[in-house]
Image: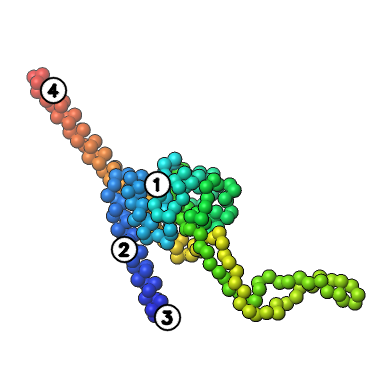
Amino acid sequence: DKEIVDAQKNTEALFALKSIQLKNRLSQHDNLKESLFQNLHSVLEISQADGFAIAFDDEVKSTGEAPDEEVVLNIANWARKNLRTSLYYDDSFTLKYKDEILGLDHLSSGVAISFLAKDRGKLLIWFRKEFKGHINWAGKPEKNVELVEIYNEKKRVVSPRTSFLIYSEEIQGKSKYWSKKHLLEIRKIHDTVLETVQLQFERVFRLNQELSKVNEELDSFSHTLSHDMAA
C-alpha cells in the first residue's frame, strides 16, 4: 500500500532529522556526562519508549515515565552483573525479575539496555510501561483432556475444539513488543552518543595541543627575556 510506504518513509526521515539535532545538542557540551544529562528529553523524544534513564556509575538521571532513580540504579547494577551483550531488551522484565530486583513495577514492564563502554559503568536504559490488552482466538486455545470409557477401560483423551467462537485472552505484566525497527533506532541513538564522545575527545585533544604550543611559546619568551635581562 502506497500510503503505508509513504508513512514509513516520513517516519524514517523524521528520525534521521531528530538524530542530527540530537548530535548537535550533545556536541555543545565538553563531556559525555553533561551532554546526556542535559539532553535526556531529546533522547526520549526520538525513542519508541515511555521513559528513559542514564546511569553513570552510581549517578542516575531519568525522564518521562520511568521508575524512581533508586530503582533505575538497582536495574543498572543487575545489568552490570548479569548481562554480557552490549544491547539487551525484554518486554516482560518486571514479570521475570520482580523477586530479584527491588522496586520493579508496571513502569519497568519493558526495558532496553545499552552499554556505552567496555567497563560497563555507563548505561542507557529505555522503559516501556505495562500494556494491558487482549488477544482474540478462534476457539479456546488450550485443548481439553477428557476421561472416556473405551471397551470397559477408562482412558484420558484430548478432545478437539468443538467451538469456533471468539475466545479473548487478557495480557498482563508485559509491555509493547520491541520490534526490530525500534531496536535499530536504539542502536542508532547509541552510535550517535559514541560519535559525540569521539568529537569531544578530538576537541579536547586539539585544545591540549594548542595549550601545549602556547606553553612552549611562553617558556621560550621567558627564557629570552631572562637572557636579555642578564645581559
> From mark 1 to mark 3, how far is it between C-alphas?
42 Å
Q: In the picture, which quadrant includes the C terminus?
A: top left
Closer to the chain start, of discs 1 and 3, is 3
> From mark 1 to mark 2, how far is it between C-alphas?
25 Å
**Could you tell me which residue is drawn at 37 percent across and 69 percent down?**
11
Task: Look at label 2 and name its amino acid.
Answer: Leu
**Number of numbered markers:** 4
Q: List x then y, in percent, for residue 68.
A: 45, 47
Q: In the picture, which quadrant includes the N terminus?
A: bottom left
SS for callout 3: loop
Q: Which of marks 1 and 3 is in front?
A: 1
> From mark 1 to mark 4, how far is it between C-alphas?
53 Å
**In contact (CB < 8 Å): disc 4 and disc 3:** no
The residue at which mark 3 appears reads as 1
**In contact (CB < 8 Å): disc 1 and disc 2:** no
Q: List x then y, in percent, for residue 62.
A: 40, 49
The residue at which mark 2 appears reads as 17
Residue 159 at least partly seen? yes
SS for callout 1: strand
Task: Look at label 3 and name its amino acid.
Answer: Asp
